[in-house]
Image (tube, rainbow, N blue to C red):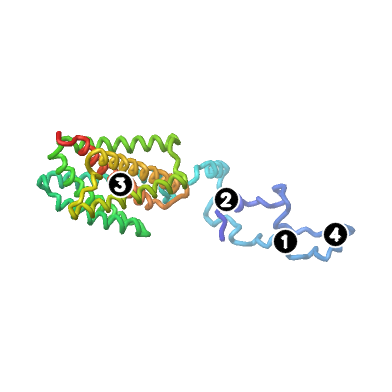
Amino acid sequence: MRSSNPVFSREGSFTRESGYAGFGTTQTPQAGSPYADNPYGNNPYGNNPYANSPYAQQPQGQAPLTDEQLAEMYAAPSAGPLATGRMTLDDVVARTAMTLLTLVAAGGLAWFALPDRAIGLAIGASLVAMVLGLVISFKRSVSPPLILLYAGLEGFALGAITKFFNTIWPGIAIQAVLGTAAVFAAMLIAYKTGRIRVTPRYTRIGIAIAMGFVLLLMINMVASMFGADMGLRSGPLGIVVGLIGIGLGAFFLSLDFAAIEEAIAHGAPQKESWRAAFGLTLSLVWIYVEMLRLIAILRGDD
């Protein structure tokens, strides 16, 4: 393999004239020398076997590199993540912005195009988005079109639901958006300052609470289908459940931050930034929905 190191291709680098051991020169021991009768004196390996190799010569038509060119070559910075196709924080920010803009655009479309109480369409879009989210989560390869499609469906569902809530409690939409942004900013600051550290024990406890929370909500949903009301979405108990839901959303954000930081540190492929954007979008949607419900409970009948 041809060396790309220009030092090894410079003429005279390993000759006696350069002051180094004479590779490429044949030395004959003088008579009377203790090495004159050395049986290895004519060993072919005593000569440089690469002296006549075409790979050791300067390519024809190409002038040797000057000292200034060599100095510039070695002083140049090494290739960064962008040049090597590795994931960076800028990639995550850009992909997350694209995903959230798709979600907001679809939400705006539902807000202006659908009637006030289009709950059926919202439920249908959210169910399709949930299935698509599961497919993306368990898919080994990252698919940006699927992630953007999920964002569009989820945004459409949230736009319809938010419009329905806003007809009952005017101004609740902007309140939920501001609340979600506040939770995101607080978690980002807490994580960056080391107030929150994602350890294995922290992760296990949080996941266990999340699984219990989801199971409880599923039981409540099944009970409500049969006319039973467990009170998990109303009154003081509803407030507690809402706060726990928002807390779990913040916990998911901390896991997202840790996963992004680890992926960048380990040189994950640039395409993985889409997976990071998907995870952040999921967490923000969770927080927004829980915030919407909590504000509705707190505002009551006003």
The circle drawn on residue 35 is 4
* In front of the other: 126 or 151: 126
In the rendered structure, which disc, 4 or 3, sits on the residue that comes first in sequence? 4
The residue drawn where x is 45% and y is 36% is 194
Instruction: Identify the element where label 1 is drawn.
Output: loop
Residue nearer the viewer, 215 or 81 = 215
Q: In the drawing, does residue 160 fall left or right of residue 41? A: left
Please name the amino acid that badge 3 sits on: Thr
- The residue positioned 15% from the left and 33% from the top of the image is 302
- How packed mark 1 is, by other alpha carbons closer than 10 Å (few <14, some 14-19, many 20 or more), is some
At label 2, counting other C-alpha atoms closer than 10 Å, the crowd grade (few under 14, some 14-19, many 20 or more) is: few
Asked if the residues shown at circle 1 and circle 4 are in contact, with their CB atoms under 8 angstroms apart, the answer is no
Q: CA distance from mark 4 to mark 3?
A: 79 Å
| Residue occupied by mark 1 | 47
Q: Identify whether 12 is placed above or below 291.
A: below
- Of the numbered discs 2 and 3, the one sitting upstream in the chain is 2
**Label 1, label 3: how many angstroms apart (C-alpha)?**
67 Å
Amino acid marked by disc 1: Asn
Q: Position of residue 282 (x, y in %)?
A: 30, 48
Q: Is residue 15 above or below residue 112?
A: below
Q: Is residue 32 visible?
A: yes
Return the residue at label 2: 6
Q: Please name the amino acid that badge 4 sits on.
A: Tyr
